[in-house]
Amino acid sequence: MSFWQQEPDLARFRPILEKYVTEPREQAHAVSVIRLCRALTDTLAGIHPFRPEERGLLEAAALLHDIGHFVDAQNHDRHSQYLILHDQTLAWAPAQHRRWLALIAGGHRRRPDLAEDGWPDGHKRQLQSLIAILRVADALDYTREAAATVVDFGLFPDRCEVRLTAALPVELEQRLAQRSRRFRKIFNRPLVPVYPAESEER
Amino acid sequence: MKAQKNEIVASIDVGTNFLRMLVAEITPEAQLLALEDLFQPTQIGRDTFSHGRIGAASLNQACDVLRGFSQIMKDYRVRHHRAVATSGIRESDNREHVLDLIRLRTGLSVAVLNHAQERFYHYKSLRNALPDVLGMRQEGLMIMHIGMGGVEVSIYTGGSLRFTQYVMIGSLRLREILAELESQTLDFPKIIEQFIESKSYLLESEIRQPGVRNVIGLGSELAVVASLCRNRKWTLDPHYLSRSALAELHRDVRHKTSEQIQRDFSLHRNEAEILLPTVITLCHFLNLTNADGVHVPSVSLRQGLLEDMVDDRFLTQRRQDFLQDIVTSACYFAKKFGSDRAHAAHVEKLALSIFDQSTRLHGMGERERLFLQVAAILHDIGKHININHHDQHSYTIINSQDIMGFSDREVAVVANVARYHSEESPSSSHGNYRQLADGDKVLVTKLAAMLRLADALDITHRQLVESVDLAVSGRELHIRLATQADILLEEWNFLNRCQLFEEVIGYRPILKRKR
C-alpha cells in the first residue's frame, strides 16, 4: 500500500459524514465504531500488524460505513460504497484511496466483490482483514449503546476476548457471533465476549 | 365510463401468513358489495423468513388453496380478478419458480408487489374506510402498516408526506428471526422490544417531532388486536384502540406462550403466534408519538385492489387524488435530495406540455405521462451526489427508492428516463438499459427524448421559456416558445438535444419564437 504515505486526517472526512448523517446518535455511532476498530487493531498488532495508513483507512471507512442510509436503508452498505466512490465532497481523495474506502465500508454487512476489480492477492488479504474488523466493531455497537460497555480486547493463543462491563443483550450476542465468523477465520481465533465475573475468575 | 350492470370481480392476496380472496360486485354506482371473503393459513412467510426459500410442502398447500379460489371464481363467473403476492414470496430465493408453479397448477398469474405498491392499495382502501384521513394528514398523521415481513411508517404534516420508511420488523419475521432466543431467555418480550428498537432507531427522531397528532394502524393482525380489546371491553369502538386498551392487552399477552394465547383468545395458531410481536410493535411506535390512541380501520390489501379496479373503471375523483399522491411522493424525494424545486417544476410543466401536445405522434397514454412527470421531478436529484455524471447518479438514487404506487419495473422505467435526460443516449452497452424489456426500452427512449427537450429549455434554471406551443408541419414539429428574455443558451442547448426526439418520434423539432 505504498500509495498512501501517511495516515489520513479523519477531519477531512467529516463533511461527507455530516452531509448524509444528520442524527447526532448516528454520528456518535460512527465515532464509537472508530474507537472499537482502533482498539482491535492495537490488540491484533502482535499477530497481524497494520501500517498506519491501513489503520487510517479503516477508521475513515468506520466513519462513513453507514452514510448509505440516506439513500435507502435496506441496501445501505451498497449505497455507502457508491457514495464514497462518487460523492463530490471526497473529490480531494485520490481514486485509489476511494476504492479502498468504498470496499471496506461497503463490506460491513455483506461479502465484498473483490474478484471484479482485479485486486492483487496481497491487497485482497489486507482488505479482508480490515473488513472483518469493521464488521465486528459495527456489530458491537449495533444497538448504539453497547459500545459503551466494551472495556478493551485481549488476545490469547486460542481466542480474542471482548471485555465488557455488562452483559450484551442476547440478540446482540447472537449477531456478534454471526458477524465475527470472518474474523475468526482470518485471525484464527474466535471472538469471545467476557463479562466482569468471568474476567475475575480468569 | 359507467358499467351498465353489476360486475363480479375478485382479488387474491397470496400473503405470508394467510391466503385470502375477496369476491365482490361492482355496482353501476361505483360501489363495492362484498360477496365472499375467504382465507386459509399458509406457511409461506415462515419458510421465507426462516430458510430464505419456500419449501415444497408449503407450495403444494398454497397451490391447493389457490386452485380452490380459482374454482370459486369460476362458480361466481368472475370477469376480472387480480392476484398479488407480498413479502413472503417477494423475498424468497425461489420466487420465480414458485410463481411459475402457481401459474401452471392454478392458472393464476400472481404479481409480486413491492411495499410502495402495498401501501398504495392499502391507502385506497383506507380512503373509503376513514374518509377523514385527508383532514388528519393536514393536522399531522403517522400511518404505520404492520405487515408480516416489515413495518412501514409514513408521516404527513400540513397535508404532505414528510417521511416514509420501511423497516424489516414485520410480526412474522420477528417471530421467526428471534425464535431460537425464546428458549434462552425468561423475558422474550424484552428481546423483541430490543430488536425493534435496534432496527427502528433511525425513524425515532422523525416520529418524535411534534405534530403527529393522529395515528392510523394498518395490517391484518390489527383487526385481531381490535377485536380482542373489544371482547374484553377495554374499548367500545372496534376501530379505535386507546393507549390504555393497548396497555391492558400488552400486560395480558406479555408473558403468555403462543399456545396460551391461542387457547385464551380462541385464535388460529398463525394468528396467535404473531399477536405478541404485533402488540409490542404497535405500542413501541405509538409511544413515540403524542397521540391518544390508534385508529384501526377495517382495510385490507384485497379491498384496496378492488377499489383500484373501481377507480380505473369509473375514473373517480379518488383516482385523481391518488395520482396526485404519487406526484407528492416524488416531490418528497426531490426535496430530500436537495433538488432545485423551481427548475424541476418548470421542466415538469414543459415536458408534460410537449407530451400532451404530441400524443398523436408518440401514441402513449396516461400512465406513461405519469412516468414522464415523475422523471421530470426527479431528473436532477443525482446532483446531490455529484454534478458530474449526475444523470447516472439520478438513475441510481431513483432505482433505489420506493415510489408510492409504482412497481419495480415502473421505478426502473422512471429511473432510466431520468438517466437519459442529459447528454448520453440509451445504449445496449449500458447495463441499466440492457436490463429493460424491449417494450420498455422504446418507452424509456421516447420519454427521455421529451424530457431532454424540456430540460434543454431551462438549462439556465431561470425559467425564461414560459410555455411551448407545438404544431406539425410535414416531418417537422414546430415548437413555438413564449418568452421575453434572451434565450440564446436555451436555443443552443435545444439544438444539441433534439436529435434523439427526431430519431424516436420521427419529427424534427424546430424552435420558433412566438411573436
Image: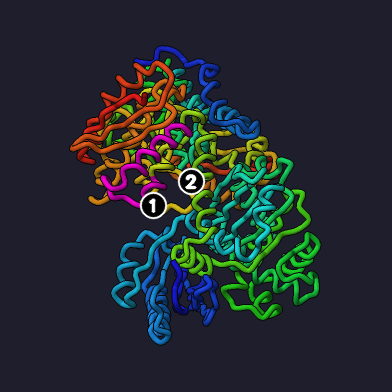
Q: Is residue B176 left or right of residue B449?
A: right
Distance between mark 2 and mark 1 Cα atoms: 28 Å
Query: How far across and how far down the image is residue B176, in percent?
Result: 53, 63
Secondary structure, mark 2, is: loop
Residue B261 percent location from the top left of the image: 68, 74
Tell me the quarter of the image containing the C terminus of chain B: top left
Q: Nearer the viewer, residue B20 or B253?
A: B20
Q: Position of residue A27 (x, y in %)?
A: 60, 30
Count of numbered circles in the view: 2
Any mark on residue B367, and which?
A: 1
Residue at x 47% of width, y 15% of height? A7
Asked if the magenta segment contains residue B353, the reply would be yes
Residue A187 appears in the figure = no
Q: Which residue is mark 2?
A: A74
The spot of residue B84 in percent (x, y) is: 43, 66
The answer to whether marks 2 and 1 sit on the same chain is: no
Q: Residue at x 69, y 55 (%)?
A: B215
What segment carries the magenta color?
A: B345-371
Nearest the viewer among B202 and A120 is B202
| Helix, strand or loop for disc 1 | helix
Most extreme residue toward the front is B515
Q: Main secondary structure of the magenta part?
A: helix
